[in-house]
Amino acid sequence: MDSDTTLLLDLDGLAVARVERLEDGTRRVHLITAGMSRRGPAPSAGCSPRG
């Protein structure tokens, strides 16, 4: 099943983490790779989360 992000952007593997409305009325969208936690990849992948 496609996520709403995939349907909107036509990019597999992305998810919207959050959206901010800026003072000028525009939006800033923060994307993450789908399937990863917000803290980053698993240590077993050779990376550690940033604190």
Image: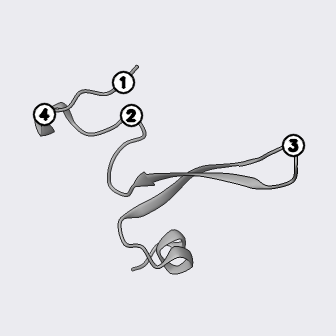
How far apart, in angstroms, are the residues tagged by discs 3 and 4? 39 Å
Neighbour class for label 1 at 10 Å: few (<14), some, many (≥20)?
Answer: few
What is the basis of the colouring in this image? Answer: one colour
- Find out whether the residues at labels 3 and 4 contact each other: C-beta distance under 8 Å: no
Q: Which mark is residue 46?
A: 4
User: Residue 4's x, y, as percent?
Assistant: 54, 73
Neighbour class for label 2 at 10 Å: few (<14), some, many (≥20)?
Answer: few
How far apart, in angstroms, are the residues tagged by discs 1 and 3? 28 Å
Marks 1 and 3, the one that precedes in the sequence: 3
Q: Amino acid at mark 2?
A: Arg
Marks 2 and 1, the one that precedes in the sequence: 2
User: Residue 24's x, y, as percent?
Assistant: 88, 49
User: Residue 49's x, y, as percent?
Assistant: 31, 27
How far apart, in angstroms, are the residues tagged by discs 2 and 1? 7 Å
Marks 2 and 3, the one that precedes in the sequence: 3
Which quadrant would the N terminus be assigned to in this image?
bottom left
- Find out whether the residues at labels 2 and 1 contact each other: C-beta distance under 8 Å: yes
Left or right of 4 in this view: 40: left
Left or right of 18 in this view: 35: left
Asked which secondary structure carries label 2, the reply is: loop
Q: Is residue 11 above or below residue 17?
A: below
Q: Amino acid at mark 4?
A: Gly
Marks 3 and 4, the one that precedes in the sequence: 3
Marks 4 and 2, the one that precedes in the sequence: 2
Residue designated by label 1: 50
- Of badges 2 and 1, nearer the viewer stands 1
